[in-house]
Image (cartoon, helix red, strand yellow):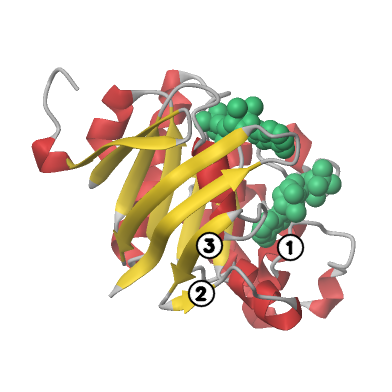
Amino acid sequence: EPIIEFKHVSKTYQNGTLGLKDINLSIPKGQFLVVVGLSGAGKSTLMRTINRMHDISTGDIRVDGESIVHLKGKELRGLRRSIGMIFQNFNLVKRSSVQRNVLSGRVGYYSTWKSTLGLFSKEDKQKAIEALQRVGLGEKLYSRADELSGGQQQRVAIARAFMQDPKIVLADEPIASLDPLTTESVMDDLKRLNEEFHITVIVNLHSVSLAKRFADRIIGLRDGELVYDEPISKVTEKD
Ligand code: ADP
Ligand code: ADP
């Protein structure tokens, strides 16, 4: 049973721009899927339909066997809580501590405005420390988010996603603003989440060579259409 399934999914934005065109896609649980394509190809749109940050125009999307297109209220929040998001610009609350940012994963939306530390249990706080240790940032608990380097901020975002106990992690060009060395560590952290916890990970990337090193499967989008779909074993040198 696939964890995510797209059936004839199309998305046209309100201004008439085509986002996705007749996407059919089945993603097995635990897969590390990389989505490649030029800027504007629809990668971000595809990703954001999975947690309903964007609604689709036609077709159906199933997550864990259940259609998500009509979810509302509590069910929609439940879906979003089960999906961790990693953004290109990290999306941390810059002036808050690393600890607060990571703990905000617990409540399922990435804002610390409600996250008075007292609301979190000892267990949550311990889990936040462990999540940070996992990404090599155990000693940064009390640092302000904006005092960290870009790579460190992205690893805080990964720890935050981990705090959610997610079934799925969606990473939208997570390395776009990072240097090559930092890129490695961020991709390694995502890969570890995937392998150790069987979390299904979807990553949007520009670089096919990077995709080849980490993905179980690579799909390609062009102008909103799925134009390439191969397991890593079938990806060739010239792809
Ligand atoms: P990618 O992530 O591959 O760069 P996107 O999914 O962001 O691509 O964009 C796919 C297409 O949808 C592009 O033509 C883009 O301009 C358009 N698009 C994205 N977001 C919106 C929006 N909110 N309103 C209108 N068009 C949009
Ligand atoms: P903004 O205030 O510009 O919407 P935010 O930093 O609050 O920016 O969030 C950026 C986007 O990410 C928003 O569209 C928000 O809904 C979305 N978002 C934040 N946290 C989550 C989450 N846990 N799951 C899904 N989407 C999220």
Tell me the amino acid under the disc marked 2: Ser
Q: Are the two marked residues, 3 and 1, in contact with CB atoms closer than 8 angstroms? A: no
Which quadrant would the C terminus be assigned to in this image? Answer: top left
The residue at which mark 1 appears reads as 109
Q: Secondary structure at mark 2?
A: strand
* For marks 2 and 1 on the same chain, the one whose residue lies earlier in the sequence: 2
The residue at which mark 2 appears reads as 67
Q: Residue 209, how many percent across, how many down?
A: 27, 23
Please give left or right for residue 182 compared with residue 54 in the image: left
Tell me the amino acid under the disc marked 1: Tyr
Distance in Å between CA atoms under marks 2 and 1: 22 Å
| Mark 3 surroundings: few (<14), some (14-19) or many (≥20) residues within 10 A | many
Q: Nearer the viewer, mark 2 or mark 3?
A: 2
Which quadrant would the N terminus be assigned to in this image? Answer: bottom left
* For marks 2 and 3 on the same chain, the one whose residue lies earlier in the sequence: 2
| Mark 1 surroundings: few (<14), some (14-19) or many (≥20) residues within 10 A | some
Q: Nearer the viewer, mark 3 or mark 1?
A: 1
Q: Nearer the viewer, residue 68 or 51?
A: 68
Q: Residue 156, how many percent across, how many down?
A: 61, 48
Q: Secondary structure at mark 3?
A: helix
Q: Secondary structure at mark 1?
A: loop
Instruction: Answer yes or no: disc 1 within 8 Å of ligand 2.
Output: yes
The residue at which mark 3 appears reads as 162
Q: Residue at x 64, y 60 (%)?
A: 52
